[in-house]
Image (cartoon, rainbow, N blue to C red):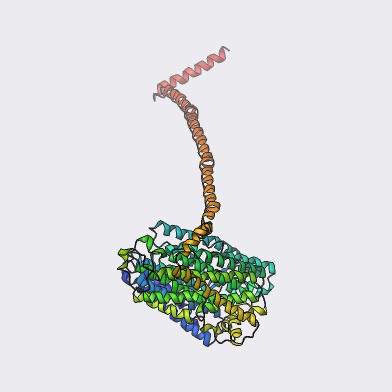
């Protein structure tokens, strides 16, 4: 089955061709079904490969398709690498991606751009598959740029809305900044190792100096920070909410935002050679986690709360990578895909139900409330997703997120652990603030819209239920057996052992299971205390949200009145967009204006001045040529003509006249001779 890996990107490529070329004319009504079928076929192939990898051969397998570039010592092939890391990523991307396709069939039904949407969606999947499957950095970069292009197309899908068009451009431009770092890092890898193929690069990675590895790591992290929305390149992601909700689920759960995490994890053999880069990643991840979580505390747009939640959870993943717990980072990537995909699709179900409400109320939680009785499936699945992300055992988020915090604590990154713990408290609070404002209390939506509120169709609720199940068991199943969890054992051949903390980092992976089971293990009582504290943080955040938004609803307004400056600061997202606008965008526009003015007045002035001089000189030359040169030529011609007129009378054609002239000439010469 592994040899059939080339089918994984082929199916969505076929979907792109069918819907892209024929969707608007022949397959318009079936575009969603065709796209979902192609995504489903890819998922089936991935399941077969995953089964073989987990229960069969395992190891690393390279599927060479064709030689791509060969120039001197530089050569790159189009080849796929199937190993434990790519297998886990393929499961997440294809599984969640397929559910998003199915959900979109109902959500986008009747939209004028229906075939175009599914063309973009399949293209997104194709690009992500290339990013994950490629056995070299250049092929990864092709997929990397592909998902960047597709995010621009999908975020700006409703391009007739100015805000959506601007959001698409913002995502594209911000990601180009990160991509510059990725390119420079890739060039450094080539210079220092002589290859871009993973296995060849990692084979010689131990020979790279610490300074070289740190430089590569920091440059690649710039690319990862752009794609995975870390400070300071996170600003594109909240604005991505302008796209259709299934796009938000696909971008924020399973595809684009996970690309940076995957790239850093894939490059772990180089990162462990440059621990300085890992320290930077851990700190940036921790600061991003608490920074974004604090903004989510006061947002009122249901999708923006989830967007800042995504930025925060990505920060947790980078915290794990930074402390050397690469497996924990990928584990959280997987569980996050389940519950964040569920939450975004659940928010889409709510927005779909409020379709008849005024546009400014459809996503504003202040106009919701009381929806649980109208939408029971959406409500209960949403609650499961919220409990999972809050970190309540035994749901998925508890196992992965608190494993990250344990790694941070046991590797001596106590500051990172504190920031992560506070961010976890905020996460539990803002998620249940969302639950209580949206589904509980009195219904506050426009009266006209209330009679139209109903549960979403099965094409939308079935994916919700599947993701809800995965949010429950997605952390428990990978966590067995208790001695370490098969997912960590499975991923071990693909990931380097963390340099930060050495043996302690490896033992911290097991703290939740071993310490809770026996009270012993590496952490001993400290590990048990961390477990209790993690649960207390989750429950405390939920309880605080209950008190403020159900028990005593006057508290939020009271706190906002008491601390107006802090409330405005959080509500306006620390004014980061305004700061960027004032310090970066406007100066660039002024520079553009200055350059345009310089070009118009100096460069164009010089060109126009030289052309004027040329014009004047050409006219002078014309007059000189006409009056002098042509005059001289014409004068010679006139003189010649005059003499020709004179002498033509001599040429009469009469022989006697010629004889007379000859005799006259002889006579004159003789006379001159005789009388000299």
Residue 363: quadrant of the picture: bottom left
- Left or right: 610, with 15 as reference point: right
Q: Residue at x 41, y 21 (%)?
A: 657
Residue 65 visible somewhere in the drawing: no
- Left or right: 514, with 16 as reference point: right
Q: Residue at x 47, y 74 (%)?
A: 386
Residue 28 visible somewhere in the drawing: yes
Q: Residue at x 51, y 63 (%)?
A: 295
Q: How many marks?
A: 0
The x and y percentages for residue 626 are 47, 29
The x and y percentages for residue 578 are 52, 54
Report the front residue among 501 and 180.
Answer: 501
Q: Is 1 located above or below residue 665 in the figure?
A: below
Report the front residue among 81 and 217.
Answer: 217
Report the front residue among 395 and 115.
Answer: 395
The x and y percentages for residue 470 are 46, 80
Residue 362: quadrant of the picture: bottom left
Q: Residue at x 52, y 35 (%)?
A: 613
Q: Is 230 located above or below residue 610 in the figure?
A: below
Q: Is 372 located above or below residue 487 in the figure?
A: above
Quadrant where the C terminus is found in the figure = top right
Report the front residue among 674 and 436.
Answer: 436
- Left or right: 547, with 493 as reference point: left
The x and y percentages for residue 545 are 48, 70
């Amino acid at each position: 089955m592994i040899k059939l890996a080339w089918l994984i990107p082929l199916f969505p490529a076929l979907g792109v061709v069918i819907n892209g070329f024929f969707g608007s004319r022949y397959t318009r009504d079936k575009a969603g079904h065709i796209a979902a079928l192609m995504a489903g076929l890819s998922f089936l192939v991935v399941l077969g490969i995953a089964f073989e990898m987990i229960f069969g051969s395992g190891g690393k397998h390279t599927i060479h398709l064709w030689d791509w570039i060969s120039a001197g010592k530089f050569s790159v092939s189009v080849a796929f690498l199937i190993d434990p890391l790519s297998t886990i990523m393929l499961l997440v991307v294809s599984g969640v991606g397929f559910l998003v396709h199915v959900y979109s069939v109902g959500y986008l039904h009747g939209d004028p751009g229906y075939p175009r949407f599914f063309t973009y969606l399949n293209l997104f999947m194709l690009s992500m598959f290339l990013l994950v499957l490629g056995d070299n950095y250049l092929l990864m970069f092709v997929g990397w740029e592909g998902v960047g292009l597709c995010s621009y197309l999908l975020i700006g899908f409703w391009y007739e809305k100015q805000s959506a068009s601007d959001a698409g451009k913002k995502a594209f431009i911000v990601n180009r900044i990160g991509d510059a770092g990725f390119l420079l890092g890739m060039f450094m890898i080539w210079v220092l190792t002589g290859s871009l193929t993973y296995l060849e690069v990692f084979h010689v990675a131990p020979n790279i100096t610490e300074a070289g590895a740190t430089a590569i790591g920091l440059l690649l992290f710039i690319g990862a920070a752009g794609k995975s929305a870390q400070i300071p390149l996170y600003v594109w992601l909240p604005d991505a909410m302008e796209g259709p909700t299934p796009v938000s689920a696909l971008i924020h759960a399973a595809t684009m935002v996970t690309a940076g995490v995957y790239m850093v994890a894939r490059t772990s053999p180089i990162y462990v050679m440059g621990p300085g880069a890992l320290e930077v990643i851990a700190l940036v991840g921790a600061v991003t986690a608490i920074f974004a979580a604090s903004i989510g505390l006061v947002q009122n747009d249901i999708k923006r709360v989830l967007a800042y939640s995504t930025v925060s959870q990505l920060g947790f993943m980078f915290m794990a990578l930074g402390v050397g717990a690469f497996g924990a980072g990928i584990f959280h990537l997987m569980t996050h895909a389940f519950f964040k995909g569920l939450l975004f699709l659940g928010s889409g179900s709510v927005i779909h139900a409020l379709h008849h409400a005024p546009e400014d109320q459809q996503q504003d939680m202040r106009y919701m409330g009381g929806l649980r009785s109208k939408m029971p499936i959406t409500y209960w699945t949403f609650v499961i997703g919220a409990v999972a992300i809050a970190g309540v055992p035994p749901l998925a988020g508890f196992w992965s997120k608190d494993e990250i915090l344990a790694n941070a604590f046991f590797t001596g990154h106590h500051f990172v652990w504190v920031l992560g713990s506070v961010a976890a408290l905020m996460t539990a609070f803002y998620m249940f603030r969302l639950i209580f404002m949206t589904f509980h209390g009195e219904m506050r939506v426009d009266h006209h819209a209330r009679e139209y509120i109903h549960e979403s169709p099965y094409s939308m609720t079935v994916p919700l239920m599947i993701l809800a199940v995965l949010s429950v068991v997605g952390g428990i199943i990978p966590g067995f057996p208790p001695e370490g969890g098969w997912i960590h054992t499975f991923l071990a051949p693909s990931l380097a052992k963390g340099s930060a903390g050495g043996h302690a980092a490896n033992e911290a992976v097991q703290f939740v299971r071993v310490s809770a089971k026996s009270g012993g293990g590496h952490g001993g009582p400290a590990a048990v205390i961390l477990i209790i504290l993690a649960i207390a943080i989750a429950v405390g955040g939920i309880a605080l949200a209950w008190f403020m938004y159900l028990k005593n609803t006057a508290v939020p307004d009271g706190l906002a009145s008491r601390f107006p400056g802090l409330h405005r600061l959080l509500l306006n997202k620390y004014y980061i967009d305004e700061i960027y606008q004032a310090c970066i965008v406007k100066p660039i526009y002024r520079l553009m204006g200055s350059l345009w003015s310089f070009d118009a007045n100096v460069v164009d002035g010089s060109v126009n001045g030289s052309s004027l001089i040329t014009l004047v000189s050409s006219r002078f030359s014309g007059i000189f040529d006409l009056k002098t040169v042509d005059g001289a030529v014409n004068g010679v011609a006139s003189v010649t003509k005059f003499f020709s007129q004179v002498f033509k009378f001599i040429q009469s054609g009469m022989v006697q006249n010629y004889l007379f002239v000859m005799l006259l000439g002889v006579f004159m010469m003789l006379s001159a001779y005789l009388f000299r």
